[in-house]
Every structure is written in structure tokens, then in C-alpha cells.
Image (cartoon, helix red, strand yellow):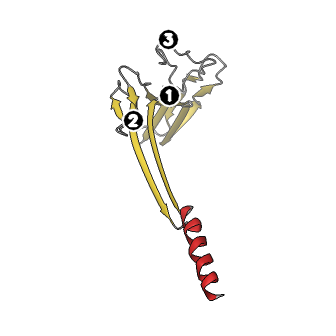
Amino acid sequence: MKRLLALLLVAGASAANAGEIRSTITDSVQLTVEGPAVQSTRIGSQYTVSGSNVTATDLGGLTAGSATAPAVRTTGDYEVTTDGEAFSFSEYDLTGDVPVTSQATLSSSGRIEAPNLYGNSTSSLGGTAGSLAGTLSPTGVATVTAGGAGTTAIGQRSVELTVFQ
């Protein structure tokens, strides 16, 4: 009985171990062309006046802007309060951005040719594929060819060997 049990264990062990080894090879090529981007923040209009020993007979300021025009500065009228005494006066004006109701469209090359930009803007050109290319071969050696600006090419081989999973 012991011999039969030992024989069954040996016969069962080889069949069980056959499924315990796994090998996986994955080849890949990734090609990327970056798109164009524009990030633009509109700057609002500002007006500030300050001083000492100064009287405003007509205070300056801003008129309201519209959907197609920024606010406009109005001039004020200021006088020294006491002649012959020290005085200080400061006036600051910043004309804000004109509102934009539509953005330029992409050109045939995938770029924003004439973006509408506000006072605080960041613009990134889109990539050009140029000669960007990638191939896989039966030998497992991926080849990649550099493209134009704004492109990325990655060739990769991943080998996984699992024993006694």
C-alpha cells in the first residue's frame, strides 16, 4: 500500500509542476505627438489714487467695460489743500484686457496659428510628427525614429518569468 501511495504522489507531482512555470514576453512601441495649448488669464482694470494734503474736487475712476471693450479711465481733478505745505499724490491706472468671445481654430498642421491672448498667458506649440516612427521585430528589438519638436518615442520589452505561482 505504501508503494502504491508513493507511486501516485510521484506521478501526480510532475503533472502539478507542469503548470507552475509561466513565461510572458511583451514588446511595445509608444509614439506621442503633443497637442497645442493656450492658457490665458484675463487681467481686469484697476484705478488707485492716494495722497496727503490733497483734495479731490472730481475723483477719477473707471467707467464700466462691455463685452467688447475694457473699462476706461476717467480723469479726476485734484488740488493741494493748503498752499505752501508739503503734499504727496499718487495715481495708478491699469487698463484691463478686452474680452474675447471666440478662440482661433487649429490650422491644418494642428497648431493654434493666432491665439487670442490676455495679459497673463502661457502658450505651448503642438508637436510635429515629422519622421516619428516605431517598429517591432521578431528579434524583440524595438526601433524608434525621432520626430519633430513635441514628440516622444518609447520602445520597450518586458520579460516576466513566474515559477511556482
Task: State the residue at coordinates (39%, 26%).
Answer: 133
Q: Is residue 69 or residue 158 the one in the foreground?
A: 158
Task: State the residue at coordinates (58%, 71%).
Answer: 11
Q: Is residue 53 above or below residue 147?
A: below
Q: Which of the two discs, 2 and 1, sits closer to the camera?
A: 2
Q: Which residue is mark 2?
A: 138
Task: State the residue at coordinates (46%, 58%).
Answer: 161
Q: Please provide percent x and percent y for residue 130.
A: 37, 19
Judging from the image, what secondary structure is the residue with disc 1 in? strand
Q: Give the Cα distance between marks 3 and 2.
A: 37 Å
Task: State the residue at coordinates (50%, 28%).
Answer: 37
Q: Residues within 10 Å of mark 1 (few under 14, many from 20)?
A: some
Q: Which residue is mark 3?
A: 108
Q: Residue furthest top?
A: 108
Name the residue type under label 1.
Answer: Ala
Q: Please provide percent x and percent y for residue 47.
A: 54, 33
Q: Which residue is mark 1?
A: 37
Q: Residue furthest bottom?
A: 2
Q: Is residue 85 visible?
A: no
Name the residue type under label 2.
Answer: Pro
Chain-order first, disc 2 or disc 1: 1
Q: Please provide percent x and percent y for residue 6.
A: 59, 82
Asked if marks 3 and 2 touch (Cβ < 8 Å), the reply is no
Q: Is residue 116 visible?
A: yes
